[in-house]
Image (tube, rainbow, N blue to C red):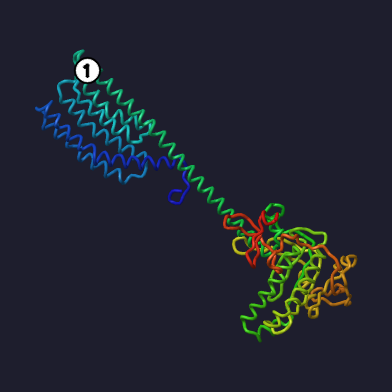
Amino acid sequence: MFNGKEITSKELREFEVNDEIKSVLKIIANWMAAPLFLAFWIADLIYIPQLKWQFLALRLTIVPVCFTAKYFIEKEQASAKSQWIATYYAFFVALPINVMVGLIPDVSTGYYAGLNLVALGALSFIPFSLSFFALTTAAIYLPYFAIVLSKAKTSHDYLGILLNTFFIVGSIVICFLIRFFNEKLRIREINSRLALKSEIANRDNIIKNKTDEAVRLNTLSTQFSPQVVQAIREGKVDLEKGVRRAQICAIFVDIVGSTERVVRLDQAKVDLVLARFMDTVVSIFLKYDLTIDKFQGDGILAFANDPIRYGDFMQRTCLASLEVREALRQDREFYLLNWKKEMQIRIGISAGYANVGFYGNKKFFRSYTAIGAPLPFASRLTNLAQPDQILIDSDIAQALEADGYNLKSIGERVIKGFEDDQHIVFELIHGPVTRVEAMPNNAACPHCADSILFLDTNPHGIFVMKCRQCGYELNSMSASA
């Protein structure tokens, strides 16, 4: 990321080159060019004393050249323009030396070596592209060759120029090799940095995806049973296929006289009781793989046979209703103490087809729910039920007859909203004497009799089954034990 945007290797190299040109040019202008230029005036005093003041004037031109280069380079953001500035800088640094060579009578003078120093400083350390490398080389040396060749007259002059040319070519080759290896190191470093950024980004994405998955599964564990959530995590169940038509069995549990209790009791007592009631009902529903649809006031609506299909989904729902009623009876002392009366409920159960899936907007709120006749029908049966009575429709009654359930017909009833059909309603009294538990043993907490396990992550990010009450975790070791 650079300035909040993803950048490519080429873009990063452009940025790095521009930044490096600025850094190198500032160092050369501040600490190298001017001191070296003025220090070599000592050589002028020794070898060319007759031109010392002219040469000093030429050497002092380095000061405005350095200041001008620093001024323009600090404002530049494009690497191509920065390279132009560096090329101009090298040309104007080399120009006084070329003028000195022109003023010296001997065309084979060793003063050309100053050009090699300029070349080493510019071509070795400034990250020029190949085209700018060639252009800068020409800007440094072409004036020299134009001057000396125009002045050469004898073979001795040409031999001296040829000898100097060998050293010049050697200096250029050295600068090119230094540039080549520096460029390889720069590209390797840039690729390493991009790879590191990509790895960090991938790691962040993995962490985010794992976190989102954990949050999603933890949220689903409040609506689905642990084994359903486990199946979702393992990819055996896909909830994202959209809404589908499914046969379900809906159940609605409602508290008798809750409005009167809420008005008469202290709010803290009401909250305590409702929390205990909800926990009991939801735990039992999840035990039988019922999907929690929604909470309606002090009532709970759920349905069976989706997202995992069962052949005995009606029996599961009815067994869950019987267990809820029995669990509330066994908790009678708690409710007498806090509810100031026995906890009585009404339950309605209905089967049929409904549209099931995620409804809502992903951005705001989504709920896995069912829309269809069984849900309002179960609610209407609840309204007809007497305290602690479980009412079921005729389709469920036919499915239960062969399984040893104790049922009682209460006759034909008019169901609000379903007046066009005739409805014979049955009361579910109790289940068969023997039955196979719907839950596997490892789905119940061994320490809390009324708590089941749900899917969560431990501090190491590993998925485990955890008890909501005591925090007990079921892992592979405890499961095998």
The quadrant of the rendering that contains the C terminus is bottom right
Position above or below: 107 against 368: above
Position above or below: 339 against 454: below
Q: Give the image location of residue 140, x and y in percent.
A: 27, 29
Q: Give the image location of residue 356, x and y in percent.
A: 73, 61
Residue for point 75% across, 58% down: 308
What count of labels does the image hold?
1
Residue for point 31% across, 42% down: 23
- The answer to whether 191 appears left or right of 243 in the picture is left
- The answer to whether 164 appears left or right of 16 in the picture is left
- The answer to whether 215 appears left or right of 353 in the picture is left
Residue 476 position by quadrant: bottom right
Give the SS element for disc 1.
Answer: helix
120, 258: nearer the viewer: 258
- The answer to whether 198 appears left or right of 433 in the picture is left
Residue 463 position by quadrant: bottom right
Q: Point out the residue furthest to the top here.
A: 155
Q: Give the image location of residue 167, x and y in percent.
A: 27, 22
137, 317: nearer the viewer: 317
Q: Give the image location of residue 473, x and y in percent.
A: 64, 60
Q: Point out the residue furthest to the left here.
A: 50
Residue for point 19% across, 29% down: 99
Q: Residues within 10 Å of mark 1 (few under 14, many from 20)?
A: some
411, 287: nearer the viewer: 287
Position above or below: 304 against 47: below
Residue 304 position by quadrant: bottom right
Residue for point 10% across, 28% down: 49
**Residue holding disc 1:** 160
Mark 1: amino acid: Gly
Q: Point out the residue furthest to the front here.
A: 481
